[in-house]
Amino acid sequence: MDNFEFCVGTDILFGKGQLEKLPGVMAQYGKKVLLVYGGGSIKRSGLYDRVKNALKEFEIVDLGGVEPNPRVETVRKGAALCREKNIDVLLAVGGGSTIDCAKAISAAVFYEGDAWDMVLNAAKGAIGKTLPVCTVLTIAATGSEMDGAAVISNMETKEKLTIIHPNLLPKCSVLEPENTFSVPARQTAAGSADIMSHVMEVYFGAEDTFLTDCICESVLKTVIHYAPIAIREPENYTARANLMWASSLAINGLCNAGKAHDWSCHYIEHELSAYYDITHGVGLAIVTPQWMRYVLSDKTVDKFAAFAVNVWGLDPHTEKFTLARQGIEKLEQFFRSLDIPMTLGELGIKDEHFVEMAKHAVDFTGIGSISYVPLTPEDIVKILRECL
């Protein structure tokens, strides 16, 4: 087990009626709020009005229209609003895209250059002081409500990049499972795939992390059990609550304690989203089984066999390569059972940009050096072609 630090300072308000507590938490940061949200879903559901009523003692400035893959243009707009209106605290009401956008805005306010330059240089110290961010979560998926990362897209340059800094960690997140009742089946499915991917990205590793692996397996089994129920019964509180908490635990550092490697499937999928603006969870569901098949080897087979036995309940006495392949097939069948498209061809994607996408993935991440199985651009092109 590798050395690690684990400190999650987000105040989680989980359960029914927790929005009532948010004003008391936010008041310690100030009274001028930038309210960040996406499309019209929070208005149709009534959540927008609930939030505005809860914060009636605050001065609120709206920033709506955050994109599903949040754009740097929106970050620039939000940072300008914060400066103009002397904003004290940001409140993101929505899913991961909205929260990620708010995080990036919180840092861009104090960055002296362009917001995209900040994203490009985040790993070199570009992020420092930030405005506090609070969240009201509306979909179980990215886990951004309880981590210090954000993913921002630049569609002009066809780049989708991750920024990570402790100051980006939300101060408080309201997790009311009822706020996810209105999430459509296709988004529930994609969100569930996203949760599972966060866990699988860190689960597959060579480190001896028995306890951490057991936690990972429990989160995976929770999603496998409750995602179909939430899709069949969208107002099933127990299913929605378990998925919502799984979303947070999958990426708040608990599931990767003692592990150290880069996220291969995510960085491959980021290229797909940057070029084709597809749903993140769908892209991950397509890429992950093909990545698994590609990296299966004498070195990795034991971990894949454990995945098959401990997550899917397959027969441990089966020959280990057969067992590993069966586990991968079970994962693919599960995603398919949620009606997730399982090929890039179904999304209208062809291979014309694969070479440049693969090169960019290696150049801008650790996928070629510190991943569980390091990948060259040629490897990534082969994986993407298998996804067609």
Image (spheres, rainbow, N blue to C red):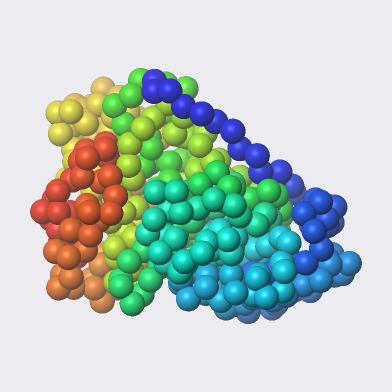
Residue at the far right in the pictured view: 57
Q: Residue at x 71, y 43 (%)?
A: 11
Residue 169 place in picture, x, y as percent: 59, 48
Quadrant location of the C terminus?
Answer: bottom left
Q: Residue at x 65, y 39 (%)?
A: 9
Q: Nearer the viewer, residue 233 or 295?
A: 295
Residue 270 place in picture, x, y as percent: 33, 60
Number of marks drawn:
0
Q: Is 197 placed above or below 204 here?
A: below
Residue 210 place in picture, x, y as percent: 42, 21
Tell me where residue 378 sits by quadrant: bottom left
Residue 387 place in picture, x, y as percent: 21, 60
Residue at the far front in the pictured view: 112
Say left or right for 212 vs 314.
right
Q: Residue at x 36, y 32 (%)?
A: 260
Q: Nearer the viewer, residue 210 or 239?
A: 210
Say left or right for 370 vs 350.
right
Q: Residue at x 42, y 67 (%)?
A: 116
Visible residue check, residue 272: yes
Visible residue check, residue 226: no
Quadrant location of the N terminus?
Answer: top left
Say left or right for 44 vs 278.
right
Q: Is 158 placed above or below 381 here?
A: below
